[in-house]
Image: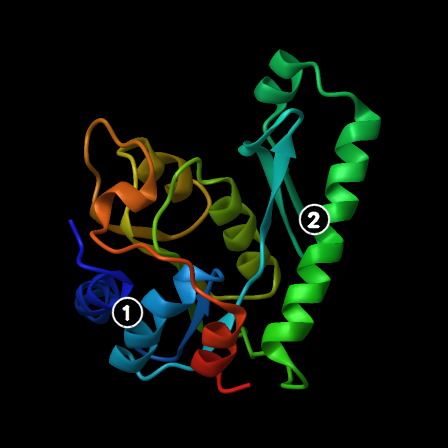
Amino acid sequence: MFRDRDDAGRRLAEAVAERVTGQALVLAIPRGGVVVAVPVAAAIEAPLDVVVPRKLRAPFNPELAIGAVAPGVQVVDGRLVRMLGVDDRYLRDEVARAEAEIARRSASYRGDRPPPEFAGRTVVVVDDGVATGATAVAALRWARAAGAERVVFAAPVGPPDAVTRLGAECDEVLLLETPRGFGAVGEWYRRFGQVSDDQVRSALGT
């Protein structure tokens, strides 16, 4: 159990600092992942930026992810799509919605700052937790495609099978807690309030 995202970030920073050396870049998944990523970036003396994946929502159940999108990357859970009977038109519309939201948020968070350098760097993708892992997978594939030399995923908490699933997408997975009976990320925080866009921009200095 973590007190809040600041506490989780400090504890995660210690673990990341033991595993990541040399030139690195920290990419946070907004919004909550940015708060967790601030002490991580400070601990390894790396610049902090964002990657903005968005989940693809299931019909009639927007909380259920049938996949995720990051810039130039699509991750679709084919088994779930078939099971729910999701048609191609719905999927195309949902991808378009997610991509538009990614563009809006990226512009809002990053402003005019130039894109970060990936070549020759270890890229650490940070979130405040993992549930289905769909957005994390999209973010990791995006970091790899952008030219990262090594890709690490780091979060305070996630289900045990997340290590295997995310491990297939990156070089290393760092999860502080992998509790059995994992339900939702927020259950492992005493305080898990909403993070505002202003807080994200403040953390990034934009």
- Mark 1 highlights which residue? 20
Residue drawn at point x = 35 percent, y = 57 percent: 193
How far is mark 1 from mark 2, CA to CA? 32 Å
Q: Pick whichever of labels 1 and 2 is earlier in the sequence.
A: 1
Q: Position of residue 76 (x, y in %)?
A: 63, 33
The three-letter code of the residue at mark 1 reads Val
Question: Residue 80's quadrant in the figure?
Answer: top right
The three-letter code of the residue at mark 2 reads Ala
117 to 16, vertically: above or below: below
Give the tally of numbered discs. 2
Question: Relative to 32, is 111 on the left or the right?
Answer: right
Q: Position of residue 91 (x, y in %)?
A: 75, 32
Q: State the quadrant of the C terminus.
A: bottom right
- Labels 1 and 2 touching (C-beta < 8 A): no
Rendered image: mark on residue 110: none
Residue drawn at point x = 52 percent, y = 78 percent: 201
Q: Taking the image as drawn, is residue 56 in sight? A: yes
Residue drawn at point x = 57 percent, y = 79 percent: 116
122 to 65, vertically: above or below: below
> How busy is the neighbourhood of tag 2: few (under 14 within 10 Å), some, or many (20 plus)?
many
- Mark 2 highlights which residue? 98
SS type, badge 2: helix
Q: Taking the image as drawn, is residue 124 in sight? A: no
